[in-house]
Image (cartoon, rainbow, N blue to C red):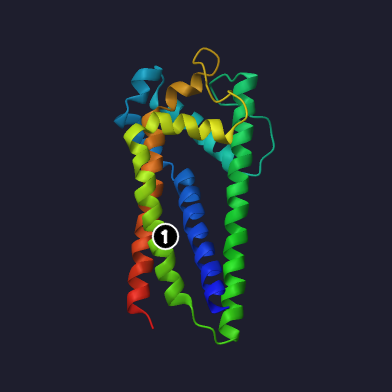
Amino acid sequence: MKNIYKIIVSILMCAIIILWSILFTIKFKHIYYFSIDKFKIHSDSSLEKYEIKNNYNYLIDYLTSNNTSEFKLPTLSSSPEGTHHFIEVKNIFYFIKTAFYVCYFSFICISLFLLSKGIRILKEALKLSSIFLLSLIGSICFSFINFQKSFDIFHNIMFKNDYWMFYPEKDPIINILPEGFFALCFFFILLLIFINSIIMLIFSRNSN
């Protein structure tokens, strides 16, 4: 039974780290601000930096909030298909946020239960979780070999339509969302997972 608890706790810890890394990256707008100059977004889109930031800030706030108002970018137009796609993305982010809280509170409840029973498995669970996450990162890193293909496969799996294939004349927001920015976000998520994995591994080796 102890091994079953260890596996359950390890799975919850892995899920918490992965989901938190995604949520943090989504909300960390400075990655995009850095990308504006890095990928010359203002030059390619013919928009001023403040206008680019305003539209991006609105997009992220819309996707990550519980606001159910109509999707309407400050200065850019959107097609019905584009609007529908962002609604779908908003639902995915809501699911990720909900899953994070469910996993987090489940972890707390199970940990308290195990402590009350005198079952100590945290050290082993930390090690198992860190090994799994580091192995996962190693596997996912192959996506960088052909990020565009991986990006397309991801969208084909997550969405049942092709509304994510934006056309600049209908949805000019695509001009301020270069593929390089998404690759940077993907790398940042992996970096957060890696850092947390190393921290867990250190704690598992030095904690009693």
The percent coordinates of residue 36 (x first, y second) are 36, 30
Please give the count of numbered marks on the rendered protein.
Answer: 1
Binning the other alpha carbons within 10 Å of mark 1 as few (below 14), some (14 to 19) or many (20 upward) gives some
The percent coordinates of residue 128 (x first, y second) are 42, 67
- Position of 8 relative to 76 (above/below): below
Q: Quadrant of residue 109?
A: bottom right
The percent coordinates of residue 140 (x first, y second) are 39, 45
User: What quarter of the picture does the C terminus occupy?
Assistant: bottom left
The percent coordinates of residue 183 (x first, y second) are 38, 36
Q: Which residue is mark 1?
A: 132
Question: Dot 1 lies on which element?
Answer: helix
Along the line of sight, which residue is nearer the eye, 62 or 129? 129
- At horizontal 56% and vertical 67% (from top left) the residue drawn is 8
- At horizontal 33% and vertical 75% (from top left) the residue drawn is 205
What is the three-letter code of the residue carrying label 1? Phe
- At horizontal 69% and vertical 38% (from top left) the residue drawn is 68
Q: Quadrant of residue 156?
A: top right
User: What quarter of the picture does the N terminus occupy?
Assistant: bottom right
Q: Is residue 30 visible?
A: no
